[in-house]
Image: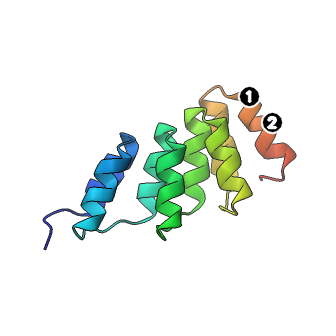
Amino acid sequence: KCGMDEGTAAGVARAGQLNVLRWVRGRGCPWDQWTCTAAAQGGHIEVLQWAREEGCPWDESTCAAAAGGGHEAVLRWAWEEGCAWDEETCVEAAEGGHLELLRLAREHGCP
C-alpha cells in the first residue's frame, strides 16, 4: 500500500505538479474525479490532459472549477472533450466575476 489516497492525487493536481502526479500514480496512489476538478481549479490544463489520457474520471465539477477559477482554456478544452457541465458552471463563473466564461457557457447551452 502506498500510504497515499485520492486526496493526495487531488492536492498534487491542484498544485500543477505533473511530474509528482506521475510519480505518485506510478506507486499506486488512487485518484478519482476530484483530481480532474483540482487540476481545473488550478488552471493546469497539462495536468488535466494527462490525467484524462490515463483514464482519470471527471464530472460536472471539473467545468465548474475551471469556470470559477477563470480558466477559459481549461473550460473550453474540457467542454470540447465532452466533459459534462451543469448550472454550477454558470454559478461559479458568475460568482468569480468571469463574465466572459458565463457568456461562453450560456452560448454553448450550459443550463
Figure disc tally: 2
Indicate whether 21 appears above or below 106.
Answer: below
Question: Closer to the camera, 41 or 73?
Answer: 73
Q: Is residue 101 above or below residue 78?
A: above
- The residue under the point 15% across, 68% down is 2
Quarter placement of the N terminus: bottom left
The percent coordinates of residue 104 (x first, y second) are 79, 40
* Tag shown at residue 103: 2
Q: Secondary structure at mark 2?
A: helix
Mark 2 is on which residue type? Arg
Residue 60 or residue 55, whichever sits in front:
55
Q: Residue furthest right?
A: 107
Residue 20 vertical position relative to residue 44 in the rendered view, above or below: below
Determine which quarter of the picture holds residue 45. top right
User: What amino acid is at disc 1?
Assistant: Leu
Residue under the point 74% across and 28% down: 99
Sort mark 2 into few (<14), some (14-19) or many (20+) by Cα contacts within 10 Å.
some
Q: Is residue 78 left or right of residue 20?
A: right
Q: Residues within 10 Å of mark 1 (few under 14, many from 20)?
A: some
Q: Tag on residue 99?
A: 1
In which quadrant of the rendered view does residue 66 lie? Answer: top right
- Please, which residue is most extreme toward the top here? 97
Image marks 1 and 2: residues in contact by CB distance under 8 Å: yes
